[in-house]
Image (spheres, rainbow, N blue to C red):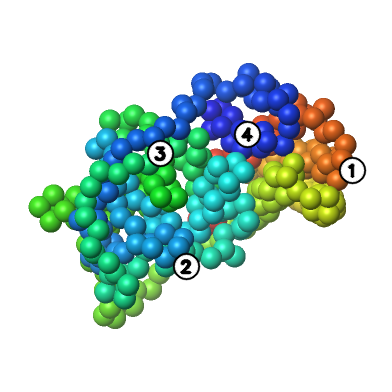
Amino acid sequence: MKRLAIFITAFSLLFTTSITAAYAANSESATPAPKKVMFYLKPDISVEMNGVRQVFKDAKNQIVYPIIYNGSTYLPIRAMSALMKEPVEWDSGSKTVYIGKTISHPIKDTALIPVNAAVSAKDDKNTNWGTEPGLVAGYSKPDVLVMYDFVIISCKDVNGGTIYPINYNGSIYLPLRTLSNLMGEPIDWDGEAKKICIGDGEDEPEEDEPIVEEPEIEIDKTAVLFKDLYDREEALYYEATAKITNIKDATTEEKQVIASTASENYLKAGSIALEIKNVDQSDFTEEEKEVYDKLAAFAESNEYYILVLENIAYLAASDSDYSMLAETFLYFAMEAQTKMEAVRESLPRTER
């Protein structure tokens, strides 16, 4: 419930205080306020990925370094995304960092990866190692949300306590432990060499490997079908939401375009829902029938949700008050999110 409630706050800027009050009744606890903090800038700490030293750069192509705050090492989030080979996007309206699937690219295969944010030290020609370690100031940012493939990431320290992103000189930093969890890679600290080692410490072997015949894999066509339908429904949910999130600040012309495309989203939602309804269930196992029912429920809820978004868009385009839809919006947003997660957790593997 907490993950869902936090996500809904990203869209509260659509409405007046009525939705804020409605959300407050659903949230579990108040989020701590951002605060100014002091931490150590550590250019003397090197970071290696599979044995190769990395140079990190911000969006302005300036070199950035690890920081240490309260005993936890942090890395800039653009560099972390580059190391993970994942897209990254910042949405200032909702103060959300998206890694992997983003609002602009819910199907992440179409998004660019910030490869220049983490480059091999030997390949970088503008390295400046003259920065000295020292105590600097930045901000702890509990109001910044971080999502990986549209799932909220909670950062923990070594003792399991919640820690928050840090903003230093306009760059958002996340704990190194979070990177380790997301990548599924071991991360070791060499205190004597002041070196962080990510991965197994060596590059992939260059030499030819013996050819091993792999067993033929039987594709589970039902699982593939479910995954395809789910991916399209999920992408549509976030695409439709992204179009109206900042509608309060849009120009009249932009609002009209948003309204028109919101109608297209609603038609598409109806089309996918009908496609799901027409799926032949005669050969489904009990487990497949259960997944199908959850998928159909998500599609129905998503269609209602996008219809609400369409109504909001047209009211905004005509300069009409749409705050009366606040509670309806919140209800369907939470319902669609809940059913979407239920499908995600029950999807079968696509191969046997």
**Label placed on residue 139:** 3
190, 210: nearer the viewer: 190
Left or right: residue 223 versus residue 275 is left
Left or right: residue 227 versus residue 175 is right
- Residue 296: x %, y % from top left: 73, 41
The Cα–Cα distance between marks 3 and 2, rounded to whole angstroms, is: 53 Å
**In this rendering, does residue 112 appear at all?**
yes
Residue pushed farthest left?
192
**Is the residue 296 above or below the residue 334 in the image?**
below
Left or right: residue 124 versus residue 6 is left
Residue visible at 56% across and 27% down in the picture: 1
- Whichever of labels 1 and 3 marks the residue nearer the N terminus, that label is 3
Which of discs 1 and 2 lies nearer the camera? The answer is 1
Q: Please name the residue that numbered disc 1 is placed on.
A: 318
* SS of the residue under disc 3: strand
Which of discs 2 and 4 lies nearer the camera? The answer is 4
